[in-house]
Amino acid sequence: EALKYFRDQGSNCFRLPITWERLQSTLGDDFVDLIEGVADTVNYITNELNAYVIIDPHNNDQGLQYNGKDVNQQQFVNLWKGITKQWGSNSKAIFGLYNEPRYGYADGRNGY
């Protein structure tokens, strides 16, 4: 397994880039309902490998969008409420606010 190999080589932190849609099936919820394997991966890295994991919402150059549509600030806040409910008590979880945070919609304008 690749993660174990790199841990054995001395790596102590792993980045987990994941699309918003794989964290929440419904935009605006303040909890995450993860696709299969995500929670297990975080637990494996932090518990079994005793390493850090960077939870990194990342929409592959699409910025602050969900299924191709700009999101508003409250939807973004709710995503982070859900992420912290899921992993906030895990001392080995590091939160990358958002990779490529462009686009979005707020106060009647795009690109907040």
Image (tube, rainbow, N blue to C red):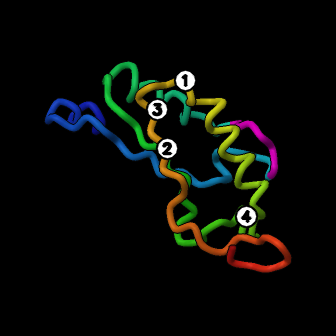
Return the disc, 1 or 4, that comes first in the chain's sequence.
4
| Residue for point 60% across, 69% down | 63
Q: What residue type is labelled 3?
A: Thr
From the image, state whether disc 1 or disc 3 is nearer to you. 1
Q: Which residue in the structure is indicated by mark 3?
A: 41
Q: Is the magenta stretch mostly helix, strand or loop?
A: loop
Image position of 41 (left or right of 59): left
Please provide the residue range marked out in magenta. Answer: 28-33
- Front one among 40 and 76: 76
Q: Which residue in the structure is indicated by mark 1?
A: 89
Q: Which amino acid does label 2 sit on?
A: Phe
Q: Which amino acid does label 1 sit on?
A: Ser
- Front one among 20 and 2: 20
Return the disc, 1 or 2, that comes first in the chain's sequence.
1
As measured in the structure, the alpha-carbon distance from the residue carrying label 1 to the one carrying label 3 is 16 Å
| Residue for point 76% across, 71% down | 105
Q: Are marks 1 and 3 in contact (CB under 8 Å)?
A: no
Image position of 20 (left or right of 16): right
Q: Which residue in the structure is indicated by mark 2?
A: 95
